Amino acid sequence: QVQLVESGGGLVQPGGSLRLSCVASASILSFSVMEWYRQGPAKTRDLVGSMFRDGNVNYMESVAGRFTISRDSAKNTLFLQMSNLKPEDTAVYYCKAVPRFGPGDFWGQGTQVTISS
């Protein structure tokens, strides 16, 4: 069973920045894609962005240009750099990994991000 552990959340003022990390217990190159999701208060869990095994990245429209996904394969870590944060970015942020082989996806426990003055 693969474990994903997110960290880096916190309280930030509007316009600020945060970097989230997702550490996997297995090689992140064993996944076909790793993704960041978020779930705001009374909202659905939405896809923020995806990084595919080949390095290609996609973002949801509302964060494109402000958020950047990267990885450190040697440390089995996926990052989400968030800049110019807005109150509407407030949410619990989750990391998800889809294995290249075999069924099932893996999720982390989430990390809270709160944007408020």
Image (spheres, rainbow, N blue to C red):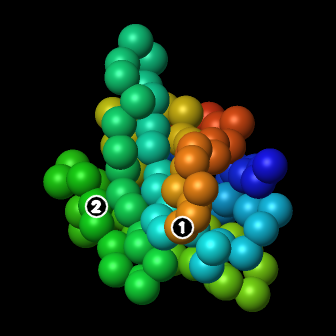
Q: Is 80 above or below relative to 96?
A: below
Circle 1 sits on which residue? Answer: 100
In x, y percent, where is residue 39?
A: 45, 29
Left or right: residue 29 versus residue 42 is right
Q: Residue at x 40, y 12 (%)?
A: 42
Q: Amino acid at mark 2?
A: Tyr
Foreground pick, 103 / 39: 103
Circle 2 sits on which residue? Answer: 59
The Cα–Cα distance between marks 1 and 2, rounded to whole angstroms, is: 21 Å
* Mark 2 surroundings within 10 Å by alpha-carbon count, few (fewer than 14), some (14 through 19), many (20 or more): some
Q: Residue at x 51, y 62 (%)?
A: 34
Q: Amino acid at mark 1?
A: Arg
In x, y percent, where is residue 5?
A: 76, 51
Is residue 12 in view from this perspective?
A: yes
Q: Is 46 above or below relative to 25?
A: above
Q: Residue furthest front?
A: 102
Label 1's element? loop
Is residue 11 in view from this perspective?
A: no
Q: Quadrant of residue 11?
A: top right
In x, y percent, where is residue 77?
A: 69, 71
Disc 1 or disc 2, which is closer to the eye? 1
Label 2's element? strand
In x, y percent, where is residue 84?
A: 36, 58
